[in-house]
Image: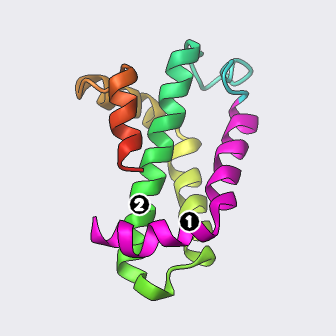
Amino acid sequence: MEAESRYCAPFFAEHPHILENYLLNYVYRTLFPFGREASAHITPQGIFGEFLLMVTQYALVYGLLAGMAGHAREAFGEEHVVRLVQSFSRTVEHSPRYLKEINALIESRGLGDPQGIATLLKFS
């Protein structure tokens, strides 16, 4: 957690709009909280399921950013964040199979309830 506290958290304390923009983009793109019924590739789920998927993706992005910050150290900056979010979006958000696997993993770990969500967000 040293990388998160030493490089990642201070960066986002100075640039809070970046993660806010990520979440806003997610809300608009996925029609949160109503789901992506218009997509033939996504199975609509309830509001809680959509919320859980958003929280999980946010936690994954933040965890990856903390790792990237640990690698880049003092050089960690906006270009790292943009590159990671773009890569994550291409790989994860456009893959219905991966999104279903995320849901299955969360459920198998017992994180599919409000306490699990709190646990996920605790480290983000």
Label 2, label 1: how far apart the Cα atoms are? 14 Å
Indicate the position of residue 55 as horizontal and vertical percent values.
49, 36
Residue at x 38%, y 33% (from the top left corner): 118
Q: Residues within 10 Å of mark 1 (few under 14, many from 20)?
A: some
Q: Nearer the viewer, residue 104 or 76?
A: 76
Residue 25: which numbered mark, if any?
none
Q: Does residue 43 show up?
A: yes
Above/below status of 56 relative to 113? below
Residue 27 higher or lower than 69, as above or below? above
Q: Overall secondary structure of the magenta stretch?
A: helix
Residue under circle 2? 64
- 17 magenta-colored: yes
Q: Position of residue 15 (x, y in %)?
A: 64, 67
Give the label, 2 or 1, closer to the camera: 1
Residue 121 placed where, x, y %?
41, 41
Instruction: Give the residue type at disc 2.
Output: Leu
Residue stretch in magenta: 1-30
Disc nearer the start of the sequence (2/1):
1
- Asked whether 13 or 44 is in front, the reply is 13
Task: Report which residue position mark 1 lands on.
Answer: 12
Residue 82: x and y, percent? 62, 68
How many numbered dots are placed on residues in this image? Answer: 2
Whether residue 101 can be seen here: no
73 sits to left or right of 53: left
Horizontal side, residue 66 vs residue 20: left or right? left
- Magenta region includes residue 26: yes
Query: Could you tell me if the residues under marks 2 and 1 are in contact, i.e. CB atoms within 8 Å?
Result: no
Local SS, label 1:
helix
